[in-house]
């Protein structure tokens, strides 16, 4: 780092220290580097190394940091657990990393039928806390154990949950508290049971890609937990399986809470890792919910009726929770296992087709990377939240490719994802709209749509202080 | 293999294996560093690994201050292996602890590691055979003092080599006044069982602290010499007081150690109880919880023997803390941290103490001198002496005779 850089690092860090206190600021090089990383394998470029990392504990401190950033014209990058999968937490220039992890308090108000929590709360912990009182958290990503509420709210992710079963997490968020880019603090939404009619400010921030403010609190309705009934169904190919899922919709079945797919090649890996005999073919596992055990079982059986019409190889009604957990684990271990055991890094894509062309899309996703100049010859796997009509092809990118080559490979895979989602008429349901996915947005909604977002961003954040790069589409 | 060659190998291995980490972040959910600090990203397994990787790839642009920062990050790890088990549970697993220790080796080669106090401790191991700067001649003072209080049949090897079992006392139980009583309790039990046992006349450190600190040379000298002596004295069976010595003998010593049966003392006591050679008689009438030391539990899968021993004591009610066995929380004393002033916002030992108190335990039992010291400090620092005490399993069994 040259002289000017280190002078700037020092001056920014010392201003931040005055705001939050000595121990909550780091200007140490390795801290700055690691705090700018996400789950991507390639290393930072030197110009991406931040000036400082700050961990405020209160919204007032965040307000002061944003005011300072505006005055000094230094970008602020907000960070939860940095597990977002489309590159949103990677800064593309020097700046301040603002970690929200100290804001981690929550409070349950059963008499109002909601809970409030700060953005640094870990999703899984929140689920556990409200679960103890008999409520279900409608946020269920594979990253539950470490993803934070703040990042999840910004993405408004459906994650593993089937949207058409209980809706998206945003449907349960009653309001948020945000610090706007200029430092003003604002509360949105309601404490009542009815959603605001007309302009609902909450909607600018839930699924707002972190563009318009730093979320410092959210309020969410308490959703009573369900009873569950489980099953697994095996097919000789993904087309039949996908047609089974279409039938659920066409035959007006109650959609399961979660319904996963693994194609045969992928399922074989998961089953082997978990020490289970190989599956006979592609598999779907699902979790039907009801208000009583009998209700859940009745719904499961209705789902099975439709699935059976597509000639499955095997139908397995699951009564034993250990069996369910083992099957669920087969799905969860795949990406980690393949990355760690091969010389490759797992890169998922998210292809969202419309319902009508789900079988075609699923088949095409089994050859997702076919014909790509960089990634065409790499291994392709397929799983997905099939009940939600969502597909996740996964590609193994070699670890020994150099950083720039890996970046190019990732970009290529995102482009392919955009192409297929455009072709099949959907829109990503999990990882936000911009950063590495910007080109989809522009192609889907046109320059008009893109300009619309840009002008809102410009109105609220004229100096482009907050999370710059996300909207511009970081490469 | 010349030095340079092996250094290159180390760098290659680190660069290759670290990139196997796929950034799933699972390790952060169990890492005691995350729990005991403000949780900056370098205070957790993946962050430490990535820092090492940048340390290698960006070596040329790093100044002294940067390197010292890297050292502090890499040496903060307690080597508790919680991350590794988590990582493995969702995939093939990254050998995280090995990589962190390799990172330390690299820092030592570069003249950056270890930490200052570790340097002093390691010097002391070389010159005096213990990390505590204590005189080697006084290593058996505890035994002499004890033998003044009761008649002992304990032999001193090699003066008398005819023993069935060697008690490897270890440095902490030899020198630390608060842990010597553990050694005395164990000796009492060996006497009670009429075992033909002995201790080494010139016992030396097992070398574990050198390995944790990345000092390959000191470790290989120490281990080679100790192993040679065990062989020369015809040792067939060793029990250790510390899980750290145990782990080092079992997993890190030269091949020739494979001929010797090595046990942690709790395993030996459990075997003896099973054979009916040791039967605690006296009612203790207390509520006890067992704290799994990392190097006995996660590192060597010894979870049940200590519990079996506790459960055989009449009147002792054994309750489990929320985190037990594989999920046990590190006390903070491992990985060379007995000689490191690592920043802790909340002391791990105090978190652990709270967990024991949450299940209303009156005693925290453990089987590791360092856990013992850490937990005892936590009891004192939080003024809980009248509510809870820390005991080694050997002490409890001896009390119940
Ligand atoms: C192994 C693994 C499995 C995953 N599984 C899923 C899955 O099943 N479904 C799914 O949808 N995603 C999944 N993800 C992606 C990721 O976990 C989620 O997107 C999660 O919601 C991100 O949370 P985070 O705390 O890591 O946020 P971050 O990545 O830290 O932040 C995400 C974005 O939100 C912004 N942000 C964060 N907090 C705030 C705040 N308080 N105010 C303003 N902006 C903020 C950040 O600037 C960034 O742009 C997975 C990731 C991994 C590594
Ligand atoms: S659990 Fe393993 S693979 Fe996942 S981030 Fe940690 S070290 Fe990497
Ligand atoms: S060994 Fe323990 S302290 Fe070290 S990184 Fe892993 S979990 Fe954290």
Image (tube, rainbow, N blue to C red):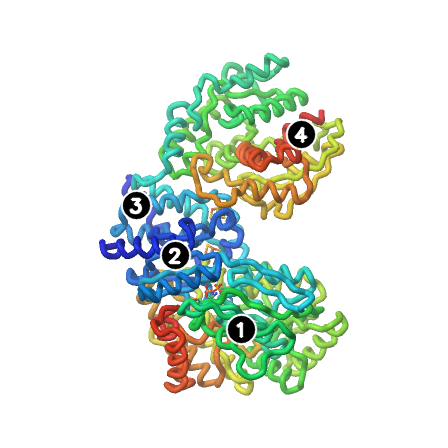
In front of the other: label 3 or label 2? 2
Residue ID at (44%, 84%): A422
Using the rendered view, name the quadrant where residue A51 is placed.
Answer: bottom left
Q: Whole-percent x and y of residue A353?
A: 51, 82
The residue that disc 3 covers is: B65
Instruction: Say if residue A407 shows up in the picture.
Output: yes
The residue tagged with tag 4: helix, strand or loop? helix
The Cα–Cα distance between marks 1 and 2, rounded to whole angstroms, is: 28 Å
The residue that disc 1 covers is: A188
Using the rendered view, name the quadrant where residue B391 is placed.
Answer: top right
The Cα–Cα distance between marks 4 and 1, rounded to whole angstroms, is: 60 Å
Using the rendered view, name the quadrant where residue A164 is placed.
Answer: bottom right
Q: Whole-percent x and y of residue A7?
A: 26, 54
- Work out whether residue A60 or residue B117 is closer to the camera in this orientation and state it: A60
The Cα–Cα distance between marks 3 and 2, rounded to whole angstroms, is: 18 Å
The answer for which chain carries disc 2 is A
The answer for which chain carries disc 3 is B
- Do marks 4 and 3 both belong to one polypeptide chain? yes
The answer for which chain carries disc 4 is B
Q: Label 2 neighbourhood size at 10 Å, few (<14), some (14-19), many (20+)?
A: many
Q: Whole-percent x and y of residue B349?
A: 55, 40
The residue tagged with tag 1: helix, strand or loop? loop
- Do marks 2 and 4 both belong to one polypeptide chain? no
The residue tagged with tag 3: helix, strand or loop? helix
Residue ID at (75%, 27%): B282
The numbered mark, 4 or 3, whose residue comes first in the sequence reads: 3
The residue that disc 4 covers is: B396
Q: On residue A53, which mark appears?
A: 2
In front of the other: label 4 or label 3? 3
Q: Whole-percent x and y of residue B42?
A: 42, 52
Find the residue positioned furthest to the left.
A3
């Amino acid at each position: 780092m040259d002289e000017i850089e280190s002078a700037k690092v020092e001056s920014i860090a010392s201003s931040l220290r005055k705001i939050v206190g000595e121990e909550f600021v780091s200007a140490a090089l390795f801290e700055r580097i690691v705090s700018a990383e996400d789950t991507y394998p390639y290393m930072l470029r030197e110009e991406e190394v931040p000036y400082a990392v700050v961990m405020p504990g209160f919204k007032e401190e965040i307000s002061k940091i944003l005011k300072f950033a505006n005055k000094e014209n230094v970008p602020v990058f907000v960070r939860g657990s940095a597990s977002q999968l489309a590159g949103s937490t990677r800064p593309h220039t020097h700046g301040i990393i603002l970690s929200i992890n100290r804001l981690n308090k929550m409070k349950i108000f059963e008499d109002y039928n909601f809970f409030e929590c700060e953005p640094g709360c870990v999703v899984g912990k929140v689920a556990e806390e409200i679960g103890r009182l008999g409520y279900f958290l409608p946020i269920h990503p594979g990253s539950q154990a470490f993803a934070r509420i703040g990042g999840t709210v910004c993405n408004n992710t459906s994650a593993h949950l089937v949207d058409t079963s209980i809706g998206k997490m945003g449907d349960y968020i009653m309001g948020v508290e945000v610090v706007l880019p200029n430092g003003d603090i604002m509360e949105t939404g309601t404490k009542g049971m009815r959603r605001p009619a007309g302009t609902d400010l909450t909607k600018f921030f839930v699924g707002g890609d972190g563009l318009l403010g730093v979320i410092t609190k959210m309020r969410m309705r308490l959703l009573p937990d369900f009873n569950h009934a489980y099953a697994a169904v095996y097919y000789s190919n993904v087309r039949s399986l996908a047609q089974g899922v279409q039938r659920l919709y066409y035959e007006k079945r109650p959609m399961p809470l979660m319904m996963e797919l693994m194609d045969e090649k992928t399922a074989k890996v998961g089953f082997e890792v978990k020490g289970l005999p190989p599956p006979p073919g592609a598999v779907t596992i699902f979790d039907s919910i009801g208000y009583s055990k009998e209700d859940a079982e009745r719904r499961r059986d209705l789902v099975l009726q439709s699935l059976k019409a597509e000639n499955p190889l095997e139908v397995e009604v699951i009564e034993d929770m250990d069996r369910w957990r083992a099957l669920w684990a087969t799905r969860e271990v795949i990406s980690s296992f393949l990355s760690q055991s091969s010389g490759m890094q797992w890169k998922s894509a998210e292809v969202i087709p419309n319902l009508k062309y789900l079988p075609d899309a699923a088949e095409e996703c089994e050859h997702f990377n076919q014909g790509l100049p960089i990634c065409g010859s790499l291994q392709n796997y397929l799983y997905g939240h099939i009940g939600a009509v969502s597909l996740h092809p996964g590609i193994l990118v070699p670890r020994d490719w150099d950083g720039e080559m890996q970046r190019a490979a990732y970009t290529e895979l995102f482009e392919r994802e955009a192409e297929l989602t455009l072709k099949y008429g959907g829109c990503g349901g999990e990882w936000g709209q911009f950063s590495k996915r910007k080109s989809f947005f522009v192609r889907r909604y046109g320059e008009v749509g893109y300009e619309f977002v840009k002008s809102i961003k410009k109105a609220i954040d004229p100096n482009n202080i907050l999370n710059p790069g996300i909207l511009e589409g970081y490469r | 293999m010349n030095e340079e060659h092996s250094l290159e190998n180390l760098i290659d291995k680190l660069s290759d294996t670290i990139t196997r980490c796929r950034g799933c972040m699972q390790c952060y959910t169990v890492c005691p560093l995350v729990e005991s600090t403000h949780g900056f990203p370098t205070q957790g397994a993946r962050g430490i690994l990535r820092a090492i990787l940048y340390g290698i790839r960006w070596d040329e642009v790093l100044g002294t201050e940067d390197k010292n920062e890297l050292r502090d990050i890499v040496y903060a790890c307690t080597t508790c292996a919680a991350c590794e088990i988590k990582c493995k549970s969702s995939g093939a697993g990254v050998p995280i602890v090995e990589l962190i220790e390799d990172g330390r080796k690299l820092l030592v080669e570069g003249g950056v590691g270890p930490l200052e106090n570790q340097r002093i401790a390691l010097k002391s191991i070389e010159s005096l055979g213990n990390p505590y700067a204590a005189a080697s001649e006084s290593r058996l003072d505890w035994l002499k003092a004890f033998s003044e209080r009761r008649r002992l049949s304990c032999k001193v090897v090699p003066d008398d080599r005819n023993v069935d079992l060697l008690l490897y006392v270890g440095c902490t139980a030899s020198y630390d006044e608060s842990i010597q009583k553990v050694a005395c309790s164990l000796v009492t039990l060996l006497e009670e069982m009429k075992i033909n046992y002995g201790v080494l006349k010139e016992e030396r450190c097992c070398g574990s602290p050198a390995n944790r600190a990345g000092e390959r040379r000191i470790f290989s000298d120490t281990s080679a010499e100790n192993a040679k002596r065990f062989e020369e004295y015809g040792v067939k069976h060793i029990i250790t007081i510390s899980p750290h010595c145990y782990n080092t003998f079992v997993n890190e010593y030269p091949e020739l150690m494979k001929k010797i049966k090595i046990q942690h003392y709790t395993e030996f006591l459990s075997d003896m109880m099973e054979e009916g050679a040791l039967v605690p008689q006296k009612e203790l009438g207390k509520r006890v919880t067992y704290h799994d030391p990392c190097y006995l539990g996660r590192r060597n899968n010894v979870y049940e023997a200590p519990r079996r021993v506790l459960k055989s004591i009449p009147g002792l009610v054994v309750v489990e803390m929320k985190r037990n066995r594989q999920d046990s929380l590190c006390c903070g004393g491992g990985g060379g941290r007995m000689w490191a002033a690592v920043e802790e916002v909340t002391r791990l030992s105090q978190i652990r103490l709270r967990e024991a108190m949450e299940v209303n335990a009156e005693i925290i039992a453990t089987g590791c001198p360092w856990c013992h010291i850490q937990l005892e400090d936590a009891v004192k620092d939080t003024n809980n002496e009248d509510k809870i005490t820390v005991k080694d399993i050997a002490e409890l069994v001896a009390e119940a005779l």
